[in-house]
Image: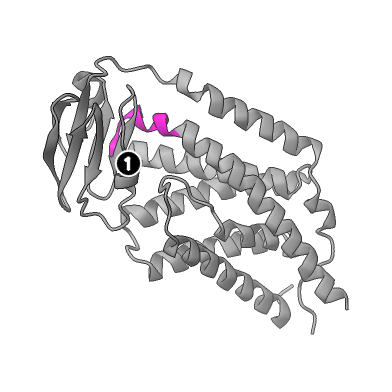
Amino acid sequence: MRSPGRIMALSMMIAGAFALASIERAMPNPFPMVRLGLGNIMTLVAFATMGITAGIWVAVGRVALVALLWGGLFGPTAVLSASGAAASLLVMVPFMATRRFSLYGVSLGGAYAHVLGQLAVASLLYVRSSMLLALLPVMGAAAIVTGIFNAWIAGKLAVRLEGRERR
Amino acid sequence: MESGINNNSLHLTRPRLCDGLVLVLLVALTVLSPRLVPVPSGGDSLLVRAGESVSRIALDDEGRHTVKGPLGEAAIVVRDGQAWLENAPCPLKICEGMGPVKKTGDVIICIPNRIYIRVGGKEKVDAVSR
């Protein structure tokens, strides 16, 4: 289970997730409410190629690194980022465990849960009003699109990775 | 060296029936969600909460209105029946990109600076912040 190769592959995926999340952060974003969730691609790749535990490691590792390096370990941005990640794991892990979903269902469920988790925590912790529900149509629609897109990319990556291994 | 990558993900890359069910459910939730929120009355003015203080700005009161949060001052600009935030002191400026707002129920939120703006709504209902 804990072979050096596995640890190395896992580290590379965490690094990849961190890189993708950082690129996304640095990109100019005309719709700041909408996140692509590129970092989640590596979580999906880890789920597909290395199993559920590896996926959890990649998601947790990414969020921790982003919070450490990009500021405010306990600021609202990090809190919301962590609550989004936690909510999406709470959906993605059971989805993976049932074995009834492909990466598409897992990614969609995770992306949408990310939005719902963030809105819920922001509403309860900061805004203390239900006014944030007004954001669900835009953020939810975006989550559906990015969820499908990320699953597609992650699927391609996973197949490539395994193709390399077979040679 | 054994790499820990197992060759079994191919079946995970093709959509399955359950994925479709999730998609339908989420699309329905997204489309129906506006109906779950009670539409606030008073759509001709902004309800502005900055920290603990609540104020109102009419949407025909054109100009720049200063609001103060814990990080500093930001400007609510009202023009042509629309409103948006400028000069926000927060790091990511997500709030500036959330405007302009004009429809009843539209919101601008600046979480780092604790500034919450909505078109319409009663103070009584929303001032549950204590």
Q: Quadrant of the N terminus of chain B?
A: bottom right
Q: Position of residue A83 (x, y in %)?
A: 45, 49
Q: Secondary structure at mark 1?
A: helix
What residue is rendered at 26% in x and 20% in y? B121
Q: Position of residue B75 (x, y in %)?
A: 16, 44
What residue is rendered at 42% in x and 37% in y? A120
Against A47, residue A117 (above or below) is above
Residue furthest toward the right? A167
Q: Position of residue A128 (x, y in %)?
A: 29, 34
Residue furthest toward the front? B80
What residue is rendered at 79% in x and 44% in y? B15
Residue furthest toward the top? B41
Q: Which residues are magenta?
A: A125-135
Residue behind mark 1: A125
Q: Quadrant of the C terminus of chain B?
A: top left
For residue A156, which quarter of the picture?
bottom right
Q: Amino acid at mark 1?
A: Leu
Res. A91 in view: no
**The stretch drawn in magenta includes residue A131:** yes
**The stretch drawn in magenta includes residue A132:** yes
Q: Chain of mark 1?
A: A
Left or right of residue A91, residue A140 in this image:
left
Left or right of residue B117, residue B11 in this image:
right
